Amino acid sequence: MAAAWIVVLVPLVLGLAVAGPVPTSKPTTTGKGCDIGRFKSLSPQELASFKKARDALEESLKLKNWSCSSPVFPRNWDLRLLQVRERPVALEAELALSLKVLEAAADTDSALGVVLDQPLHTLHHILSQLRACIQAQPTAGPSPRGRLQHWLHRLQEAPKKESPGCLEASVTFNLFRLLIRDLICVANGDLCLRTSTHPEST
């Protein structure tokens, strides 16, 4: 199971990593304390720390027996499928679950804890900036519905339904999609063009 996930996701990560330069735009919102636009790209040092953490997590997973009853992140997870105003909410849920799972892994394995220290600090900083942007948005917006509601429910229920090993594997293999595609999409706001709508799927 783990090998299959790696085979599928490594080409995705490599393809995203060699993508062209990200166009510049204004931050997603301009509210006080909101500076999500600075995350259009992470520094080489930050990316290197995340790669080291991912490699350590993958080595740790090789020693564990894990499986998932269903994918934690929906197969059609792509923030470009959402409205621009919905994307920060989806990213917040993705970040919050990732932090919860990675912090648990760091607490149970001291060696992993050392490697994860800097990435966890960076993810916390990104999440705090993202929440400042969400709070700066008008509060009278509609409640989550449709695809966004389905995705949020999926991530909320995952810790109740899946094993710690499944959650750790899911977050590990999703880590660079979060950093290279989802975070950059939110940081670019309107310049992250919406894709055509596809039927709902799990």
Image (spheres, rainbow, N blue to C red):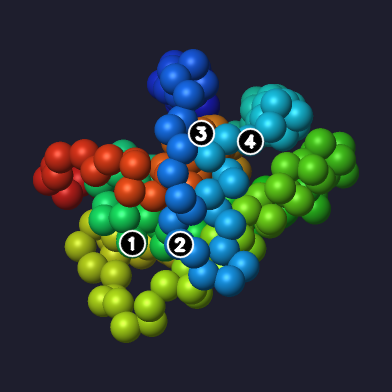
For mark 1, what is the residue? 85
Q: How many marks?
A: 4
For mark 2, what is the residue? 29
Q: In the rendered image of this protein, does residue 108 appear above or below residue 153?
A: above
Mark 4 vs 1: CB contact within 8 A = no
Mark 2 vs 3: CB contact within 8 A = no
For mark 3, what is the residue? 180
Task: Say which of 146 and 155 sits in front.
Answer: 146
Q: Residue at x 44, y 56 (%)?
A: 28
Can you tell which of label 2 and label 3 is closer to the viewer? 2
Mark 4 vs 3: CB contact within 8 A = no
Can you tell which of label 2 and label 1 is closer to the viewer? 2
Mark 4 vs 2: CB contact within 8 A = no
Q: Residue at x 52, y 27 (%)?
A: 2
The amino acid marked with disc number 2 is Thr
Q: In the rendered image of this protein, does residue 99 appear above or below residue 56?
A: below
Disc on the earlier residue, 4 or 1: 4
What SS does tag 4 mark? loop
Residues packed near mark 2 inside 10 Å, few (<14), some (14 to 19) or many (20 plus): many
The amino acid marked with disc number 3 is Ile
Can you tell which of label 4 and label 3 is closer to the viewer? 4
The amino acid marked with disc number 1 is Arg
- What distance separates the C-alpha of mark 4 from that of mark 1? 23 Å
**In the displayed structure image, the side of residue 55 where residue 148 appears, left or right:** left
| Residue 107 horizontal/vertical position (percent) | 80, 53
Mark 2 vs 1: CB contact within 8 A = no
For mark 4, what is the residue? 42
